[in-house]
Amino acid sequence: MIQGGARWWIVGVVASTVLAGCTAAPAGPGASSGSDSTVTPGTPATNGTPADSTPATPGTPGTPTPRTTPSPLPTVLPAAPAWAAPPTDFTVPADSPYVLDGVRNVTQVGQITGAEGPGDTTQWGVGFCDLGSMFEANGKVYFTFGDTFAAREPGATGGGGTGWRSNVMGWTTDATPADGITIAGMIVDDKGIAKELLPSKKTDFLEMTVIPTYGFEANGALYLHWMSVKHWGPKGGEWVVNDAGLSKSTDEGHTWTKLDAPRWDGKSGFVQIAPAHVVENGVDTLYVWGITHGRFAGVSLAKVPAAAVEDPAAWQYYTGTDSAGAPQWGNDYHAAAIVIDDTVGELSVMWSPYLDRWIMTYLREGTGIVMREGLTPWGPWGKAITVVRARDVPGPYAPYMLPRYTEANGATIYFTLSIWEPYEVFWYRADLKKAG
């Protein structure tokens, strides 16, 4: 459960059957540096000049967004656009100019989760949840959600309520992002309720929850990167983590096995990640950008052949460049260099064929959702351009992209966005503005 400018820790847990009294509630209101007002999201996002974006957002934060009329879903997800394929040429010279000049037409297309989403996830006991990172596998797009609740008391805000699960997963075959995303199904228990995939002890200062930070497909299996949260705090936007690692499913997400390795300690730069497939020298390779616990540090980088993702020795961590500017790699994640020095929250990275650059979205504390362009996976990375201002939405965070959900060769992107109140996941779009 991630608040738009602060993680809120959960107390008052009654350990009982999901949907039969398991309750979690925020421990007192905490001012969020990421949500300082409740202006409607029709206010333009901007990177410094009003011309950089234009308002076009329906709905008012804190009230249900009108349902979109979804397109009928295909049985199997159609092939992605050609431009969404993993890139084979994904670096440009370090002295190349930056070309991302802003974003425009930033629009809240609709709601994904809860009763107001076109898939009405309450049918699976998912009334309130956050996150929603995406990955493709088995002819579906999987959405992985964080702390999830079936219901909450009238007047409650943010995360908390009954039917607490630390994580759940939905899926869709929706191939038309322009009219919203319909969740077609979820990974459920024998009662048809969305089940907790990765169990947690739900005990404060031991293991409060286990949050999936991102998923990916490799070797015909599904993988989830998770972080084991010991305690929410000690201040907004920061939390204490036991460790982070990978879990694996070989039955399309129905059961998960926690892998013994690789693992990252709770103070490392890989507590939360954003992976992207590339084809490097003919090999399917995952580039993995990582951040530490909380939202007050920069971004590190790793890479691993997808076929060897379970082998810690196969992971290489970026340590800097040599005198010729070539990237250097090592096997010690503690020695990983910072590629973006900023206060970075939940992040997402993909190659943009429209820009011929990498783009990264993340929460920057106090500012809101920002985007940067990168000339290579390790940089240099351009200035942060604001996409959704913190003062326009009550607690925005977790802006997750997927190459499939783009249009016009990547000139238009779509992304999920969690909003602390009403504690739901929404669907946004934005047009990239290229210089020249």
Image (spheres, grey):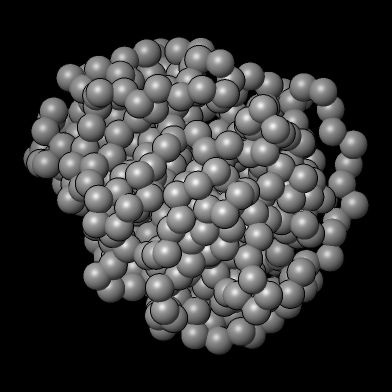
Residue 170 or residue 157, whichever sits in front? 157
Asked whether, in this view, residue 288 is left or right of residue 78, the answer is left
How far across and down, in percent of the image, does residue 117 sit? 77, 54
Q: Considering depth in this image, is 230 or 172 the residue closer to the camera?
A: 230
Residue positioned 33% across, 73% down in the render: 236
Q: Can residue 8 be seen at all in this image of the molecule? A: yes
Above or below residue 422? Residue 291 is: above
Q: Is residue 88 visible?
A: no
Q: Left or right: 83 with respect to 86?
A: right
Residue 110 left/right relative to 141: right
The quarter of the picture where residue 84 lies is top right
| In front of the other: 193 or 185 | 193
In percent of the image, x 55 and y 70: which residue is there? 158
Give the position of the C terminus as an image quadrant. Answer: bottom right
Q: Position of residue 379 (x, y in %)?
A: 30, 48
In the figure, residue 332 lies in which quadrant? Answer: top left
Q: Is residue 172 above or below residue 431?
A: above
Q: Say which residue appears at 53% left-offset and 64% top-offset.
A: 160
Q: Position of residue 45 (x, y in %)?
A: 59, 74
Report how many numbered discs are placed on residues in the image.
Answer: 0
Residue 408 spot, x, y in % from top left: 71, 44
From what the image shows, is residue 175 above or below residue 354?
above
Q: Is residue 153 left or right of residue 306?
A: right
